[in-house]
Amino acid sequence: MLLVALVAALTGGLVVFALQTRRLRALGNVMHRYAGEDADGRLAIRYPGNTHDEVDVLGQQFNAMADKITSQIRELKQMDNVRREMVANISHDLRTPLTTMRGYLETLQLKHAELSVEEQQQYLQTALSHSQWLGRMVEELFELTRLDSCESVVFSEPFSMCELVQDVTQKFQLRAREKSINLGASLNPDAPLVYGDIAMMQRVLENLLENGLRHTPAGGSISIGVEEDSGNIVVQVKDTGCGIPAEDVPRIFERFYQQDKHRSGSNSAGLGLAIVKRILELHGSVINVSSELERGTTFSFRIPATPVVINS
């Protein structure tokens, strides 16, 4: 009887060993196939075990690792596509004004004697405008690169959002009047202070107003509102411009994305709203947008308020 029991135990052990070895070989084969495939071929290679024992746990860990690698590869591909698109956009946006500047300056050089003083001034003014546009674009590129770098630091301090909005609005009043646009602000004098980087917040407001002035026709209006809501300061910049097509709304904060393809006369490089988005991300906030074609667009964001209250 003892011999029979030993034989049975040995046989059972061999069977279990064979089963485990077969499953380990299957897992090894999956890993070997995964290592031998390219990035696209690895997408569908996973271990199919579902017994929830030690071998299955090891297989699940391999699957988790494979999923993470796949996700990272997709992110790298997306980043590479963005980089390629950015390089193409930069090249295009630099080439156009440079070509225009060169054309006007060459005309001045070759036909100086044939042009009237008024025509010469007009050509010089056009070349100067394009050079200023190039300067703004380069500055925005540097600013966006700095905001994306690990060295970007937010110097937070308590400040009055209402006072900042008032200052920025006053700064843009002349440009608004020149374009026959009514620019106003609706402020809550009892709104508490906010805590953030005042220079960065000024940049956010300036970029949003620049965007509004660019897309609002003569006779339209732009308003900035500041209100308190549940311990936050809510800032809204609303214009009565031509609005943004629904298919463009999810992409307007992408770098170099030109929603202006639906509009004429814009000289935007497509970086202003990307800078707004990045600054608010550094402050733990998000930028929201709602828009209706031919009716206007509203941008809004929230910044946590401090307990200090401004006296009216």
Image (spheres, rainbow, N blue to C red):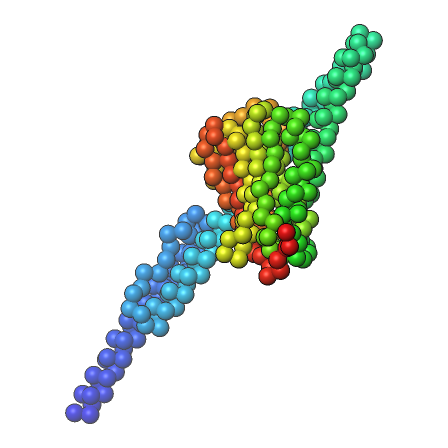
Residue most toward the left? 1
Is residue 79 in sight in this rendering? no
User: Depth check: 43 or 304 in front?
Assistant: 304
Residue 251, compared with residue 152, is above or below; it is above
Residue most toward the front? 312
Residue 111, compared with residue 29, is above or below; it is above
Q: In percent of the image, x 36 and y 69: which residue is there? A: 57
Residue most toward the top? 114
Count up the numbered dots. Answer: 0
Residue 38, compared with residue 133, is above or below; it is below
Where is residue 13? Give x, y as percent: 27, 80
Which quadrant of the view contains residue 168?
Answer: top right
Q: In percent of the image, x 75 and y 21: which residue is there? A: 125
User: Depth check: 104 or 310 in front?
Assistant: 310
Is residue 220 in sight in this rendering? yes
Q: In percent of the image, x 50 and y 41: which residue is there? A: 289
Residue most toward the bottom? 2
Where is residue 312? Give x, y as percent: 63, 51
User: Depth check: 146 or 153 in front?
Assistant: 153
Q: Quadrant of the N terminus?
A: bottom left
Where is residue 162? Give x, y as percent: 63, 47
Where is residue 120? Give x, y as percent: 78, 15
User: Depth check: 163 or 14 in front?
Assistant: 163
Which quadrant of the view contains residue 36?
Answer: bottom left
